């Protein structure tokens, strides 16, 4: 551990640049997935445990398309549309039936969905680890010391653009306004003539599409396997819980923050502690929030 | 009326239960067929390798049956395997082995796929005194439990990457350097198999006094090891070793290429399974990959001929294979061990067969098989192969190796 700290700050401080870059690239994808979760959670109060499996499904769709010679970047719009349709379908089949029930029913339903999706992908594609070669160049800086693959830059730019589009969409479009209205008060929205069922369907489908996009990006920069979804679900939950619902900029910030924390933890303590960093971050935020809220909390006993 | 139907159903199902238990609990030999039992992973995360294993067993059984079967005391027996799908879960595998032994009356077991599942089923067959010849569990810890009925035809996992250290030392000595000046970087998954591999490497490195500069553990759901490789970039090790099953190989293949890691020797386990040579053609060039078996091995047996012949015949029987994984070859070898042991014992008595297996000392297409007291095969070495232009070249001595590794990024 001290060796690693020494390496980081004394012997070769230049590798900080590499670590920060990796953290930002990872964070962009986490932010995207968490953003989708925050949307569904905030608007519909459905805690979607199948979040990570949507990501992996997006990656496998890209994989299928790449077999037909389509470059992953160009398969992005197709994956977006397919995942949107899939999300809508899942809403009609499952989510609509559990949305009015209590939290545990929706947790159970989405957990079941997650299992079914994993096994389905396993049957369809097999359990092998897959990758997609994007054949994009790798840039080097500082005498080959820092390497930046074009694929990661593209994924960062795409994630940013996509997030921006969603933010604008939520602010300006009719559907975006309807989603925000429903999220504030579903009954009032219904009274004012908003078809909340449609809003829910759209929100869930939009989340699936966002995850699908994240899946495309995952497929070109990492590896994937039918059972890898849980990683993304877990981190998305940590990020959304830490950032708080209804605070979308905070979700994105927490996504990047977690990316950086994970990479530094991994550098100093070892790669196996990456996921521990996510959970510890969540714990610290929750404890800190408890303490800071205590001052203003008034409880009648 | 409803009551009568209900009563009839209960009666029928009870009858079924009684019949079911009585008819299935007969024994190992049906007429002149010896039934071997195996729980293999046909679904779940190990299903690919489970299928490779099953095909290896089946191929050997068919071949033995068609070439005269097993000859015990002048009588010829046929072999058959009863399979159950363990769904890649240890608990299920243990249950099924118990069922094979207790309900189906199987008296001789073949192993499941992988160290984890083998670890789960070994105590069960041990408890019932049923011999098990396994071909897919390489973890060292399987052979430190004092099992008397467990035998493995493959080399144990601590031998997987240790040859890379030997090769590095040989090259250093040839260049007039002291091997203790070499720096070794290691990244191993935190699972029984990879930690065994790590132990073997540590022993070998200690022998030469090499310095371990990185010793990272990788998580089970690994998809990013960029920080470990960043360290490797800064510390410039001479030898880089990675082991983490297929995902470790795929992640390493991808990121070693992306981050342009330069080390004289890079060795990775499970290259073939992750298809590192195809997917990362340029980065994989010069990487070393351990394998249990090479098709060019000259050893042979009466049933299959040599390794090349086995390989060619298997591809005829299963045309979907371009390259046959070693998992399949060793599964076939396990069945050969049974045939030889039955014939040597001259009986189907479990204890006699167990002793005959323990005394096995035979040459097969897969390699030499001779079991230690603990049950692991001590006669067969692990092979190293180097990826070169998309093909795997066997490295028998250090001179066969392209050194330093030439990677064109």
Image: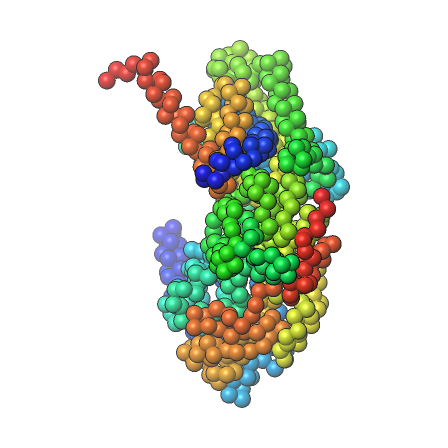
Residue A193 visible (yes or no): yes
Judged from this view, the residue extending furthest toward the top is A192
Q: Is A184 placed left or right of A174 in the picture?
A: left
For residue A249, above or below residue B296: above
Tell me which residue sits at (63%, 48%) in the image: B263
Q: How many numbered marks have been drawn onto this rendered protein structure?
A: 0
At a point 65% along the width and 58% down the height, the residue shown is B175
Q: Position of residue B409 (x, y in %)?
A: 71, 43
Q: Quadrant of the C terminus of chain A?
A: top left
Instruction: Report the residue at 45% width, 39% height from top.
Output: A1
Frontmost residue, A17 versus B258: A17
Q: Residue furthest front?
A: B176
* Residue B87 coordinates in the image, percent (x, y): 50, 54
- Residue B304 lies left or right of residue A6; in this view the side is right
Query: For residue B353, which quarter of the picture?
Result: bottom left
| Front-most of residues A130 and B179 | B179
What's the residue at 66%, 30% (across, down)?
A153
Q: How is the image coloured?
A: rainbow
The quarter of the displayed image where residue A59 is located: top right
Q: Is residue B226 above or below residue B157?
A: above
Image-based side of B273 in relation to A289, left or right: right
Residue B294 figure quarter: bottom right
Query: As drawn, which residue projects farthest toward the left?
Result: A301
Residue A151 in view here? no
Nearer the observer, B366 or B67: B366
- x and y percentages locating residue A294 in the rendered image: 32, 18
Residue B288 is situated, as x and y percent measured from the top left of the image, at: 63, 56
């Amino acid at each position: 551990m001290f060796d690693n700290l020494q390496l980081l700050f004394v012997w070769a401080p230049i590798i900080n640049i590499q670590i920060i870059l990796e953290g930002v690239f990872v964070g962009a994808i986490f932010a995207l997935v968490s953003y989708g979760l925050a949307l569904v959670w905030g608007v519909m109060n459905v805690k979607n445990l199948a979040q990570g499996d949507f990501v992996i499904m997006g990656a496998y769709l890209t994989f299928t398309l790449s077999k037909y010679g389509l470059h992953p970047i160009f398969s992005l719009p197709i994956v977006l549309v397919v995942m949107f349709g899939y999300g809508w379908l899942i809403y009609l089949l499952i989510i609509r039936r559990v949305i009015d029930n209590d939290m545990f029913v929706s947790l159970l339903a989405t957990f079941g969905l997650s299992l079914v999706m994993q096994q389905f992908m396993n049957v369809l594609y097999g359990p092998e680890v897959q990758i997609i070669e994007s054949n994009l160049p790798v840039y080097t800086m500082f005498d080959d010391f820092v390497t930046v693959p074009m694929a990661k830059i593209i994924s960062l730019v795409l994630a940013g653009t996509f997030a921006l589009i969603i933010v604008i969409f939520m602010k300006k479009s009719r559907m975006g306004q309807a989603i925000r209205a429903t999220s504030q008060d579903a009954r009032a929205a219904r009274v004012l003539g908003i078809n909340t069922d449609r809003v829910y369907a759209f929100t869930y489908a939009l989340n699936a599409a966002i995850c699908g996009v994240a899946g495309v990006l995952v497929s070109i920069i990492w590896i994937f396997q039918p059972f890898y979804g849980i990683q993304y679900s877990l981190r998305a939950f940590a990020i959304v819980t830490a950032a708080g619902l209804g605070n979308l900029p905070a979700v994105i910030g927490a996504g990047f923050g977690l990316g950086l924390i994970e990479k530094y933890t991994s550098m100093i303590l070892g790669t196996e502690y990456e996921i521990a960093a996510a959970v510890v971050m969540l714990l610290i935020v929750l404890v800190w929030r408890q303490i800071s809220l205590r001052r203003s909390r008034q409880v009648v006993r | 009326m409803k009551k009568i139907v209900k009563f009839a159903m209960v009666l029928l199902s009870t009858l079924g239960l009684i019949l079911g238990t009585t008819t299935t609990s007969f024994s190992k030999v049906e007429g002149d067929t010896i039934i071997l039992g195996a729980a293999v992973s046909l679904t779940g995360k190990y299903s690919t390798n489970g299928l490779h294993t099953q095909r290896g067993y089946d191929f050997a059984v068919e071949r033995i049956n068609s070439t005269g079967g097993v000859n015990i005391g002048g009588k010829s027996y046929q072999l058959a395997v009863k399979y159950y799908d363990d769904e890649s879960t240890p608990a299920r595998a243990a249950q099924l082995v118990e069922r094979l032994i207790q309900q189906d009356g199987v008296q001789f077991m073949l192993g499941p796929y992988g160290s984890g599942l083998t670890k789960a089923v070994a105590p069960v067959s041990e408890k019932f005194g049923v011999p098990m010849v396994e071909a897919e569990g390489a973890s060292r810890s399987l052979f430190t439990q004092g099992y008397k009925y467990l035998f493995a035809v493959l080399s144990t996992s601590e031998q997987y990457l240790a040859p890379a250290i030997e090769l590095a030392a040989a090259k250093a000595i040839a260049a007039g350097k002291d091997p203790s000046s070499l720096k070794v970087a290691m990244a191993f998954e935190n699972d029984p198999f990879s930690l065994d591999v790590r132990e073997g490497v540590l022993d070998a490195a200690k022998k030469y006094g090499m310095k371990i500069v990185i010793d990272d553990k990788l998580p089970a759901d690994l998809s990013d090891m960029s920080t470990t490789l960043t360290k490797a970039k800064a510390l410039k090790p001479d030898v880089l070793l990675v082991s983490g099953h297929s995902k470790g190989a795929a992640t390493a293949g991808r990121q070693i290429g992306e981050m342009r890691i330069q080390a004289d020797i890079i060795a990775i386990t499970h290259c073939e399974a992750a298809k590192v040579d195809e997917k990362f053609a340029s980065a994989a060039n010069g990487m070393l990959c351990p394998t249990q078996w090479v098709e060019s091995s000259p050893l042979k047996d009466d049933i299959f001929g040599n390794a090349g012949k086995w390989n060619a015949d298997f591809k005829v029987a299963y045309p979907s294979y371009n390259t046959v994984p070693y998992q399949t070859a060793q599964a076939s070898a396990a069945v050969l061990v049974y045939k030889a042991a039955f014939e040597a014992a001259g009986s189907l008595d479990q204890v006699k067969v167990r002793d005959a297996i323990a005394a096995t000392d035979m040459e097969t297409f897969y390699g030499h098989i001779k079991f230690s007291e603990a049950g692991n095969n001590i006669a067969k070495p692990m092979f190293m192969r180097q990826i070169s232009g998309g093909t795997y070249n066997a490295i028998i001595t250090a001179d066969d190796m392209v050194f330093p590794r030439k990677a064109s990024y």
